[in-house]
Image (cartoon, rainbow, N blue to C red):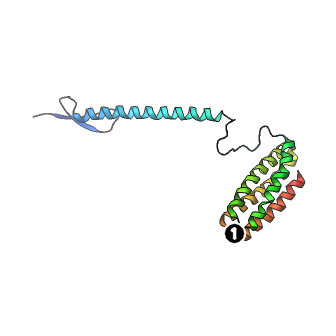
């Protein structure tokens, strides 16, 4: 008769039966699995290190354009350049009306996004150059203008003509107000 006794294997909560202290096939398989888990964890750590290094390297390359640029203020943009750009970008924003009247919704959205993003950058640059006591009112006007732009974009997506025209009128008012303050 063979005497069986329970044996606990480290790193697992499973109990194996052995015969006189000799390891069974199940114990050998468990040790191989532990080694595989260790290798798997090391691979995950290695991949994590590599991706972190790649992300830090790619973020250090500022001169390569990749997709979207989330900067609000262009580092080489002067106040004069921003003031000159405001007029042309504001005209581009107001020319969206022609596309709205033609009910060219997708084209209106594209032109709206293009001109509003450039206008947003220019206005933000000028606001940052103003003294602190003038900024609060300008930021409020800035918020109202671009909130209306976002609403117009959503209304154009839904092809809701009455809402689009309503938002466009709000944009014209807000744009005139902010341009008079700048």
Rendered-image quadrant of the N terminus: top left
Left or right: 142 with respect to 106? right
In front of the other: 35 or 93: 93
Residue at image coords 67%, 67%: 159
In front of the other: 181 or 79: 79
| Residue 35 horizontal/vertical position (percent) | 35, 31
Q: In the rendered view, tell whether residue 115 sits above or below residue 162.
A: above
**Total numbered circles:** 1
Residue at image coords 34%, 33%: 34
Q: Residue furthest toward the right?
A: 180
Q: Residue furthest toward the left?
A: 1
| Residue 75 horizontal/vertical position (percent) | 77, 38
| Residue 46 horizontal/vertical position (percent) | 48, 31
- Could you classify mark 1 by the number of other residues whose Cα lies within 10 Å: few (under 14), some (14-19), or many (20 or more)? some
Residue at image coords 74%, 65%: 100
Residue 177 image-quadrant placement: bottom right
Q: In the rendered view, tell whether residue 165 sits above or below residue 146.
A: below
Which residue is tagged 1? 160
| Residue 173 horizontal/vertical position (percent) | 84, 62
In front of the other: 53 or 132: 53
Q: Residue furthest toward the bottom?
A: 162
- Mark 1, secondary structure of its residue: loop
Residue at image coords 69%, 69%: 160
Q: In the rendered view, tell whether residue 34 sits above or below residue 99.
A: above
Left or right: 106 with respect to 31? right
């Amino acid at each position: 008769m063979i005497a069986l006794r329970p044996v606990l294997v480290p790193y697992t909560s499973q109990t194996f039966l052995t015969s006189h202290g000799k390891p069974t096939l199940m114990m050998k398989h468990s040790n191989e699995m532990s080694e595989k888990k260790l290798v798997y964890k090391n691979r995950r750590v290695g991949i994590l290190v590599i991706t972190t290094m790649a992300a830090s390297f790619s973020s250090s390359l500022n001169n390569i354009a990749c997709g979207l640029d989330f900067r609000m203020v262009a580092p080489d943009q002067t106040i004069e350049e921003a003031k000159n750009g405001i007029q042309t970008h504001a005209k581009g924003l107001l020319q969206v009306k022609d596309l709205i009247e033609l009910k060219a919704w997708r084209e209106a959205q594209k032109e709206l996004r293009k001109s509003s993003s450039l206008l947003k950058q220019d206005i933000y640059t000028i606001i940052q150059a103003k003294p602190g006591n003038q900024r609060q009112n300008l930021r409020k006007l800035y918020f109202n203008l671009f909130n209306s732009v976002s609403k117009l974009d959503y209304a154009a997506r839904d092809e809701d003509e009455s809402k689009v025209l309503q938002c466009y009128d709000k944009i014209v008012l807000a744009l005139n107000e902010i341009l008079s303050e700048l």
